[in-house]
Image: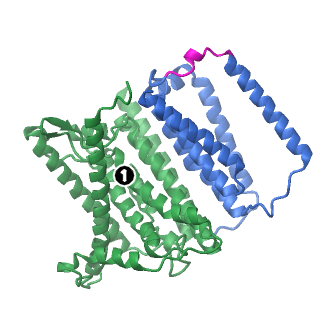
Chain colours: A blue, B green
Amino acid sequence: MSIIQIIFLLLSVMAVGSALMMITSKNPVNSVLWLIVVFFAISGHYILLNAQFLAIVNIIVYAGAIMVLFLFVVMLMNLNAETEPVKNRRLQLIGVTSGGALMLIIVSAINKIDVEQLVQINAGDSGLIKVLGMNLFKNYVLPFEISSVLFLSAMIGAVVIGKKEEIDIKK
Amino acid sequence: MLLAIDFALLLEKLILVVVVVFASLGIAMYTTFAERKVAAILQDRRGPNRAGPFGLLQPLADGMKLFFKEEIIPNFSSKFLFVMGPALAMLTACMTSAVIPWGDKIDFFGRSVDLQIADVNIGILYVFGVVSLGVYGIMIGSWASNNKFSLMGGLRAASQIISYELAMGISLIALLMITGTLSLKEMVVQQQHGYWNVVLQPLGFLIFLVCAFAECNRTPFDLPEAENELIGGYHTEYSSMKLGFYLFSEYINMFISSVVMATLFFGGYDIPFFDESVLSPNVAAILGIVALMTKVIAFIFLFMWVRWTIPRFRYDQLMHLGWRILIPLALFNMLATGGVILFFNK
């Protein structure tokens, strides 16, 4: 085994293990923290694939921003096992069915892929910032701009919802 | 082949990591001493002068005091997370030093050693990523205390840090437009041959400076720890060295952010008005480190000078400054920089 394979295995075990811990832990704050560990493991995979920009953006956006908000909400609501209402059987059944269906699709999709070509480690530069920028601003300008307009509208929407109840803010 | 690693490189980097981390810790230790001395000078006092010559052993005495204090872990709190809070604060404070170029190449018994732990091509983003993780130490610690006031203090600190990260990021974008690189090393090299970035980006530097004060929880933004008028803050339940780690990580942050500011805007290890290439590489590298440290000490002094001069903001004033003044100003700076680049390059 080469060093890269060992690192890959370690990261994979870390990702899958903490994902499992995230779903199974009773305390929602622990779940959020395990999810952050998952993001770090995935960032490690990105670095193995020579996509440093993607790795660090994954950390800044997901681990650094979105999960902080998650943590905020979970901590303030102070959820715990005693106060959480037990979900009814039907909902659980629906969840299991839809999750199983998704897994079926993913497994069948992976089955079609040529296994030899699954991962090319440390080859290619599609994840580097220069290549990514050139691609985004030359080949995919329109989708990029449209999605940024979408983000802008989401931002404005958030501000509007936040300002619904007019509160006097004293200077 | 099993484990084909360049062991010499590994050893070199390991030594560099140990040196850099211990140097940061040592400098942060004496920053606490300098803080008390500067405060004393500004208030016309003598400051600590009992432990050792000129009171130089004071930081050791402080550390010892914290270690020997009784350690209290509240009941009904998650013990693991309670301990992890200060540990994370220390970790994120030390992590940034990995991408900082401390000096030029140094010749060491025929081996050319780069005085930078990792010259990644996303240096600035790495710094930014670590800064955005700095919130976790505070939030986890405050939640694990199982105390409403700690949690409130943690929220206060976290929302301050998040608010000022935005303006900081936008002011960095303007800098990136000028330099055209994300690597800190390349930025320093560019500044060695051209102007310092502070000349090209005065407004960007000012915004970055204010945000750095806020990110380090320094006065006038030290509301996370406003024990006089609010409450102790996120570390209310902490005692002994765990409290010490929280306070100490603040000093490491101050040191690291001084280094980052010196590197980004003040030429890093560049010696002003002097061509380093006339010196032998080793002498140039050592003088470069001295130059960087001089700039860093100047920044640290600025941090302290401001602390003992300006009173603390009210919380709504702090939010007002962050969201309504700094972010529009940073956006304006970014647009203006883009416009100027477009106008002169075409």
Q: Residues within 10 Å of mark 1 (few under 14, many from 20)?
A: many
Quadrant containing the N terminus of chain B is: top left
**Res B74 → quadrant:** bottom right
Q: Label 1 lies in what chain?
A: B
Q: Is B47 drawn above or below residue B96 in the view shown?
A: below
Residue B261: image location, x then y, percent: 33, 52
- In the shown orientation, is residue B49 left or right of residue B253? left
Magenta span contains residue A119:
yes
Is residue B275 visible to the viewer in this orientation of the structure? Answer: no
| Front residue of B33 and B6 | B6
Is residue B164 visible to the viewer in this orientation of the structure? Answer: yes
- SS assignment at label 1: helix
Residue B168: image location, x then y, percent: 46, 51
| Front residue of A91 and B288 | A91
Q: Residue at x 46, y 24 (%)?
A: A131
Q: Residue at x 87, y 39 (%)?
A: A94
Residue A66: image location, x then y, percent: 61, 48
Magenta span contains residue B257:
no
Q: Amino acid at mark 1?
A: Phe
- In the shown orientation, is residue B114 left or right of residue A14? left
| Front residue of B9 and B221 | B9
Q: Residue at x 25, y 79 (%)?
A: B41
Q: Is B307 drawn above or below residue B333 in the view shown?
A: below
- In the shown orientation, is residue A69 left or right of residue B234? right
Quadrant containing the C terminus of chain B is: top left
Q: Residue at x 80, y 29 (%)?
A: A101
- The residue indicated by pointer 1 is B205
- In the shown orientation, is residue B51 left or right of residue B179? left
Q: Is B179 drawn above or below residue A119 in the view shown?
A: below
Residue A64: image location, x then y, percent: 55, 49
Specify start and end residues of the magenta stretch as a single range. A112-120
